[in-house]
Image (spheres, grey):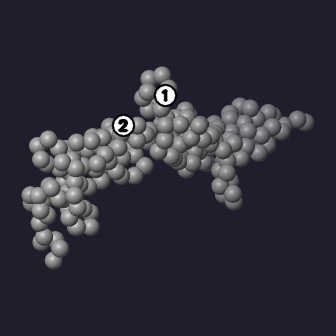
């Protein structure tokens, strides 16, 4: 089978198992193209793509450099610039560090852009560094509608003090409020005579 074949000197096996020429370095060994690293399996050299969240600029290294806490959008990346902020974070233009998207926002993309930090829908919020719209939950004074899945303001005569997707509580007996979105039971007013 082709797997039993050994490439002649100055040739390497590609991903398909065929022998191809490689660039040679001053030591006569192979140098992989950017985005690829040297792979040695039982003495047979080949060049393979760098794995996810790694990159390789040039040379005959057997390891690609890690992106640290950053991520890549695919394999075979060629520079540190290909390492992007993970979901929930964006690149700070001053510190050049990935920092969490603000409370009330989420970011699902692997990117450096702050504009990818999206607002949660009306009457909802999220924790800092959230990575999905499903991380958004209803604010105090709002509840999750079972029909459409959106957060809506608590209707008149109800209140809810804590964030979350729970239902609103009715005002106590003999109290009411014409306003919606109450966040405290004490906002319910005594009924008039």
- Taking the image as shown, residue 18 lies to the left or right of residue 113, namely left
Q: Is residue 116 visible?
A: yes
Q: Nearer the viewer, residue 98 or 164?
A: 98
The residue pinned by badge 2 equals 80
Q: Earlier in the sequence, mark 1 or mark 2?
A: 2
The image quarter containing residue 115 is top right
Q: Nearer the viewer, residue 136 or 155?
A: 136
* Residue 170 x/y as whole percent: 72, 45
Q: Indicate whether 98 appears above or below 166.
A: above
Q: Residue furthest bottom?
A: 1
Q: Residue furthest top?
A: 94
Image quadrant holding the C terminus, namely: top right
Q: Indicate whether 72 appears above or below 187.
A: below
Label 1: element kind: loop
Q: Residue furthest left?
A: 43
* Residue 118 x/y as whole percent: 60, 41
Label 2: element kind: helix
- Taking the image as shown, residue 161 lies to the left or right of residue 28, namely right
Q: Nearer the viewer, residue 86 or 173?
A: 86
* Residue 157 x/y as whole percent: 78, 43
The residue pinned by badge 1 equals 92
């Amino acid at each position: 089978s082709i797997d039993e074949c050994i490439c002649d000197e100055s040739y390497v096996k590609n991903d398909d198992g065929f022998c191809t020429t490689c660039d040679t370095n001053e030591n006569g060994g192979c140098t992989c193209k950017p985005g690829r690293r040297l792979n040695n399996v039982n003495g047979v050299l080949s060049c393979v793509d760098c794995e996810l969240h790694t990159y390789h600029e040039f040379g005959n290294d057997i390891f690609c450099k890690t992106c640290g806490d950053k991520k890549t959008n695919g394999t075979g990346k060629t520079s540190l610039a290909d390492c992007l902020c993970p979901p929930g974070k964006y690149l700070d233009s001053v510190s050049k560090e990935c920092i969490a998207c603000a409370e009330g926002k989420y970011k699902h993309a692997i990117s450096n852009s702050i504009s990818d930090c999206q607002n949660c829908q009306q009457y909802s919020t999220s924790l800092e560094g959230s990575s999905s719209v499903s991380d958004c939950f209803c604010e105090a004074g709002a509840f999750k509608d079972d029909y459409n899945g959106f957060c809506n303001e608590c209707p008149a005569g109800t209140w809810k003090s804590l964030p979350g997707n729970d239902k609103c509580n009715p005002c106590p007996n003999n109290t009411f409020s014409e306003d919606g979105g109450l966040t405290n039971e004490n906002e319910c007013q005594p009924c008039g005579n």
